Amino acid sequence: MKRTFSFFAPILLLTLASAQTYTVTDLGPGGGVGGGRAINNLGDVVVDNGGISYVWTPTHHYLALSPLPGGTETLAESINNRGIVVGESIFSVGYHAASWTNGKPTDLGTLPGGVLSWANAINISGQIVGASDGTNVGPEATLWSDSGSKGLGFLPGGSYSEAFAINRVDQVVGFSYVKGGGSHGFIWSKATGIQDLGTLPGGGTSSANALNDSGQVAGGSDCGSACQHAVLWSGVKGSIEDLGVLPGTQFSSAYAINNHGVVIGSSGYTAFVWTEAEGMQNLNDLIPQGSGWMLEYAFAINDNSQIAGFGILGGQERGFLLTPQ
């Protein structure tokens, strides 16, 4: 929403007074743009600290996520409302997709003929998506379920794809290389297969990073030379909304969306929240003044509008949790 500062001071004050604000909780070290990577509706947060990922709970309990046998590090990416975490276990050479229950890992394996795999998301029923190499040309978006692993294919002409999110009704989103170069965001379902979500006008590349149970999809798209904006797809083919950028920045990307349609992400290394009513807002303007935080990336949001991400506090890289006041 564009704000007007001339002649409308009383209206502006009312708007600012009604804006959503947040308290900030320090989740601990979050090296390498790690921090709060995922959050469920219980307020459990997956935190990556550049080594052994862990789960932070609202009771301030920390649960370390152990590597698979022979592994050296873990990188966790998602947690569902049952507390099951997914990501990857990293070895001295390579990595495998893994799930964790109460901190204990399970190897998800790869597509037939594969060596490497990684998991990015899990839904409430325990279906998991990510990517795996195999016998195809390149890594392929992958769905793990009780019946095993399944490749989701590529957009026409593509040789690489990766899935980033899966919702309650088993829709999957991600990106796939396309014929002629570049990559496009896709949405997949069992009924329709893989479908191209397209790009903003003038763009050649896009990525679908998240979706909610209504089929709204959030991500990013090129929009011309040196231009990349956060976008929102309705899930209908050909529908794409440009969410813009924060003032003074040139690029943005959306990383998550909740079931109320609230989108979060980063614009010019500054964390943002976007709503239909307010447009894109700098999250640093919505936390207590003098907190010492510089919020850089907002990676995850739950249906209570709690937000997890990565920022700088006292010159150190830290994970954060924002809770609406």
Image: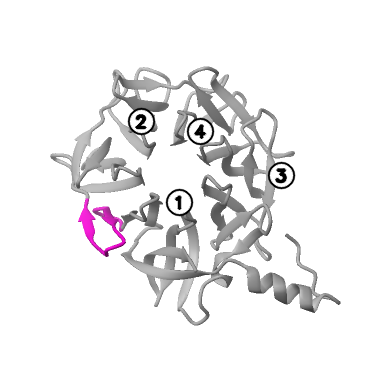
**Percent x, y of residue 12:** 75, 73
Could you classify mark 2 by the number of other residues whose Cα lies within 10 Å: few (under 14), some (14-19), or many (20 or more)?
some
Would you name the residue on which mark 2 appears?
Answer: 127
Would you name the residue on which mark 1 appears?
Answer: 302
Would you name the residue on which mark 4 appears?
Answer: 173
Gap between marks 2 and 4 measured at Cα: 13 Å
Mark 3 or 4: the one toward you:
4
Mark 1 or 2: the one toward you:
1
Gap between marks 2 and 3 measured at Cα: 36 Å
For the residues bearing labels 3 and 1, Cβ distance under 8 angstroms: no
**Percent x, y of residue 141:** 43, 28
- Label 3 sits on a secondary structure element that is loop
Which residue is more in the foreground, 319 or 127? 127
Q: Does residue 34 appear in the picture of this structure?
A: no
Which of the marked residues, 2 or 3, is nearer the chain's N terminus?
2
Gap between marks 4 and 1 measured at Cα: 18 Å
**Percent x, y of residue 73:** 23, 48
